[in-house]
């Protein structure tokens, strides 16, 4: 069982608000990822990190930003939420030398 | 052309039958392959990984890899209603990011 956590699980907010989605893992994984997934649609990689102070943009352009100050923590921030940001956000992690990714439970975000 | 392609389904199978899911990938440098199961509204969970040509069995699941044909498949034997979900195929070249297919939705009918 993977120990990766996301909070909040559900969030409904108004347009223009700043939000931070939290992701933490207790497995000591160096690699962490953020995916965006609309209902019934594909997973899209939006950010990833291979270690502390390392962050990269993924395949899907996103207005969000991430930081990696601690190995176990990889928060995602939206400075000004819009209805187009409504989606499910999934965090995942893997070992630096490994490839299997373990997913957190996800945050379902609704922007009104 | 997508890097990892799957038939979106739905693949409808009667309970107790074998469900056969297919996946093709375009990057010949891909070395690691994964099947994830995702229930509606939930996050993906790993079912199997496969790295070498041939078959790999784990319980009711068998993954098959053919690198020459750039083809990965998943067989689910004795399908149960609880197997109804979307199955995601993923491929990874060494050191690179995981690339997911769009998923195949499986419906197991009692």
Image: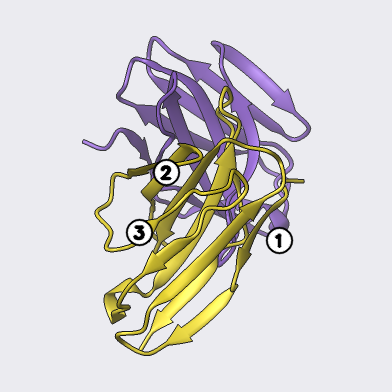
**Chain label for disc 3:** A
Residue annotated with mark 3: A65
Disc 1 element: loop
As drawn, B5 above or below B66: below
As drawn, B101 above or below B97: below
In the figure, the shade used to draw chain A is: yellow
The colour scheme used here is by chain
Residue annotated with mark 1: B110
Q: Are marks 3 and 2 on the same chain?
A: yes
Q: Are marks 2 and 1 on the same chain?
A: no
**Chain label for disc 1:** B
In the figure, the shade used to draw chain B is: purple
Whole-percent x and y of residue B103?
Answer: 44, 47
Whole-percent x and y of residue B57?
Answer: 71, 24
> Can you say which quadrant of the picture contains the C terminus of chain B?
bottom right
Residue at x-position 43% and y-position 32%: B23
Q: How far is mark 1 from mark 3, CA to CA?
A: 46 Å
As drawn, A86 above or below A57: below
Tell me if label 1 and label 3 are in contact, CB under 8 Å: no
Whole-percent x and y of residue A23?
Answer: 57, 58
Crowd tier of the residue under label 1, counting other residues whose Cα lies within 10 Å: few below 14, some 14–19, many 20 or above = few
Disc 3 element: strand
Residue annotated with mark 2: A48
């Amino acid at each position: 069982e993977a120990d990766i956590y996301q909070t909040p699980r559900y969030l409904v907010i108004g347009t223009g608000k700043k939000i931070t989605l939290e992701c933490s893992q207790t497995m000591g994984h160096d690699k962490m990822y953020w995916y965006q997934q609309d209902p019934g649609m594909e997973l899209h990689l939006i950010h990833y990190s291979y270690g502390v102070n390392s962050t990269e943009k993924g395949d899907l352009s996103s207005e969000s930003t991430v930081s990696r100050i601690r190995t176990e923590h990889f928060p995602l921030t939206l400075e000004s939420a819009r209805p187009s940001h409504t989606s499910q956000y999934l965090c995942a992690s893997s070992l630096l030398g490994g490839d299997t990714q373990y997913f957190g439970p996800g945050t379902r975000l609704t922007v009104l | 052309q997508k890097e990892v392609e799957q038939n979106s389904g739905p693949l409808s199978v009667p309970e107790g039958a074998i469900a056969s899911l297919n996946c093709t990938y375009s990057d010949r440098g891909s070395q690691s392959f994964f099947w994830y199961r995702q229930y509606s509204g939930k996050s993906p969970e790993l079912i199997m990984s496969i790295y070498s040509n041939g078959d790999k069995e784990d319980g009711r699941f068998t993954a098959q890899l053919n690198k020459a044909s750039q083809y990965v498949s998943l067989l689910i034997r004795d399908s149960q209603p609880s197997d109804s979900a979307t199955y995601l195929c993923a491929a990874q070249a060494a050191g690179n990011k995981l690339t997911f297919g769009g998923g195949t939705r499986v419906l197991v009918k009692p």
